[in-house]
Image: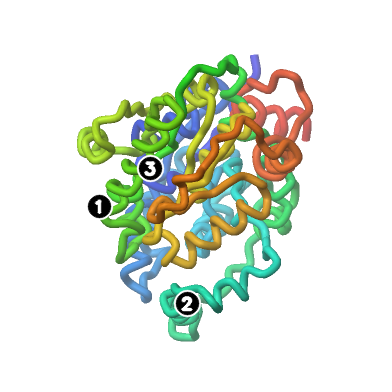
Amino acid sequence: MRVKKKLIIFLPYSLGKDFIRKYDVKNAKNFFNIKFFDLNKILKKNHYNKNFDLENNLHDLKRLLISFKPDIGIMFSHDTVHKKIALFCKNIVPIKMIYSNTNLIPENMIIRPKGIYLDLLISKNFFSYLFYFFKKILNFSFFNKEKIIEHNFDYSVTSGSAGKYIEEVKMSKKNFYICSSDYKKSFKFSVKRKNYAVFIDEDLFFHRDYKRQFREKKFVTKKYFKEMSNFFDFIEKKFKLNIVIALHPKCEKKREIKKLFHNRKCLIDSTHKIVSECKYVFVHPSTTSISIPIIYKKPLIFLTTNELMKNLEWRMRLERRKFLLNQPFINVSKNEFKDFKISENFDKDGYKNYLNLFVKCCNRKVCDKSFWEDLNFSIFDKA
């Protein structure tokens, strides 16, 4: 029996149930001897202190590297701090570093829909967009400019062809492709067409990433829930469909959200199950879970609000997905949905293209091996 290779998993945030579930950590232990290193505290210190000396705060990591002697380390992010840490590891022990991103989204590649800039110029939200640009320019000004770290990862692991546009992938010494976890998970479910629709929630009001990403302002106020519920009331009454809310997997306030959504059925960790069996799916275009209804070939309807459209970052997410997928979108803040007609049709070419770009990389009829099994095979058997 082969001895398991030693692996350090660098945690982008603390080791919790959501991380264990998202990255299938229990399965990883079947193929690797694993240790964890939590980057969360270091990332916070680096954000708040521009003079933060990273290397002098990595004593625990150095001890772990020397005592554990890992064969490989895997990173799930690619900012300057992660590159510094990857380089630090390689200076301590002969370790191979992996950059991993199997949750690709349109923002991983450059998409410039025709006419979008003219639309932005004449938009009533132009000044809020201008303010957004101004803040971005400040962030990249010479006051905050950091020294560019010259480090190429030994391996990169991505899903879909859009991964090739990521700088860390382009500069990696060797690239591997592994289908996304959502695509792998989908083989456990059967596609049905029960008489209900699903709204995939993003936890836009309570999401804990507001703190983790140091966002000063939320995307929405509680007005958002009133507008969304009003739209759902209309859909349920006109089309005789129940709306089921698929809560964000990191949702920590299920009771509050359920109440704000007028006590509709709210489920957590059930998105695959309820989407695979529904008729239609309503989504905000910014959700990474958009791949799930596309995998199951469910008709998508994009939803937005006036509050969301004021944010340029969010607006561009919408435009990119509209460019890739010819699916209807509705601003629920307006009364434009009164004449809305629900359809079972979907953009077959757009769905296929989206899957190939961001979700899958193989043509196997069944692709249900775990990420870690595929990784182990790619690096130590196939390589």
The three-letter amino acid code for the residue at tag 1 is Lys
Q: Give the answer, above or below, for where 346 lies relative to 322.
A: above
The three-letter amino acid code for the residue at tag 3 is Phe
Q: Nearer the viewer, residue 290 or 5?
A: 290
| Circle 3: element type | helix
| Circle 2: element type | helix
| Circle 1: element type | loop
Q: Is residue 359 visible?
A: yes
Q: Answer few, some or many: residues within 10 Å of disc 2's Cα (few below 14, many 20 plus, some between 14 and 19).
A: some
Count of numbered circles on the image: 3
**Residue tagged by mark 3?**
231
Q: Give the answer, above or below, for where 328 lies relative to 15.
A: below
Residue 182's image quarter?
top right
Residue 108's image quarter?
bottom right
Separation of disc 2 and disc 3 at Cα?
A: 27 Å
Q: Provide residue 105's location: percent of width, then percent of height.
A: 59, 49
**Residue tagged by mark 1?**
222
Mark number for residue 126? Answer: 2
Q: Is residue 69 visible?
A: no
Q: On the rendered image, what quadrant is the N terminus found in?
A: top right
- Image point (58%, 71%), residue name: 119
